[in-house]
Amino acid sequence: MDSLQFQKAEFADSRPVCAGCKNPIEGSYYQYGGRAICAACSEHIRLAQMQMPREAPSLARPLLFGAGAAVACSAGYAVITLLSGLELALVAILVGYLVGRAVRIGANGVGGRPLQILAVALTYVSITISYVPLILRQVSPGQIAKVLPLITGLALVSPLMNLRSGVSGILGLVIIGVGLMQAWRQTAPRRMLALTGPFTAGQGPAVG
C-alpha cells in the first residue's frame, strides 16, 4: 500500500496551472495581477486591454446621462418626502451611487478626474434641489415664478445653512458628504493590472 501511494505521488503533475483556463502551463508563462497564466490567455488579455477605452471622448454624453439620473433622483426624493412627510437623508447616499453610475455608463465605463468632478457636482445639485418642491408648497401659485430663483439658490446652500441647527445639521452634511463620496468612487479611473512576461519555468517571479 505504501509503495502504491509513493508511485502516485511520483507521477503527480508539478506543472503550474493557468489562472485563466486552468490548464497546465507548458514552457513559458506570463503573470497577470500576480498570478500565472498561459500564453493563450495572456494574448486574450492583451487584446482586451488594447480595445478598452482609456478616456471618454467628451463630457457631453456623461453629462446627459448624469443629469438625467440627477433629475430623476431629485423628483423621486421630492415625491417620497411629499407623500410620507419624512426627509430621508440617507437617500443622499443612494443618489450619489446612481448618479455616479449613470455618468460612468455615459462615459462607456471610463473613469477619471473630470468625470468624478462632474458626478460630484450633479449629485450635490440633485440632493439640494430636491428641497425646492418642499419649499414651494408654502408659496402661492402666482408667486412661484418670482420666488423660484431665490428658492433654488437657498436650496443649493441649505446644507451649510442647516449647520445652525446643531447636531442634526452636521449629521445631514456628513450624510451628503458620504453621497458625494459614492459619486466620486463610482467614476474613479480603473486600475489596470500589469501583464508581465514571458517567464521560463523556474525563472522570474514565482508562479501563483
Image (spheres, rainbow, N blue to C red):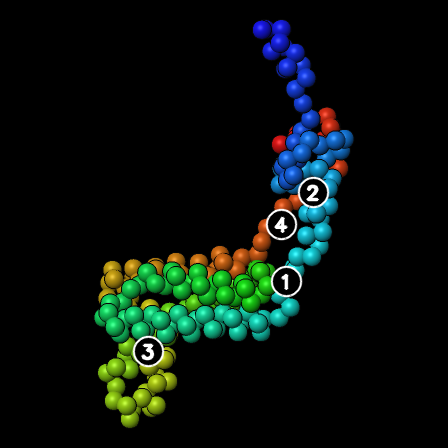
Q: Residue at x 65, y 19 (%)?
A: 12
Among numbered discs 3 and 1, the one appearing first in the sequence: 1
Q: Is residue 149 above or below residue 198?
A: below
CA distance separating discs 3 and 1: 35 Å
Can residue 85 be spotted in the picture? Answer: yes
Among numbered discs 1 and 4, the one appearing first in the sequence: 1
Can residue 128 be spotted in the picture? Answer: no
CA distance separating discs 1 and 4: 13 Å
Under tag 3, what secondary structure? helix
141 relative to 153 in the view: left or right: left
Residue carrying label 4: 192
Badge nearest the viewer, 1 or 2: 2
CA distance separating discs 4 and 3: 42 Å
Among numbered discs 4 and 3, the one appearing first in the sequence: 3
Among numbered discs 3 and 2, the one appearing first in the sequence: 2
Q: Tell me the quadrant of the picture where the C terminus can be found.
A: top right
Residue carrying label 3: 132
Residue carrying label 1: 55
The three-letter amino acid code for the residue at tag 2 is: Cys
The three-letter amino acid code for the residue at tag 4 is: Met
Pointer 1: residues within 10 angstroms few (<14), some, or many (20+)?
some
Tell me the tag on residue 41: 2
Under tag 2, what secondary structure? helix
CA distance separating discs 3 and 2: 54 Å
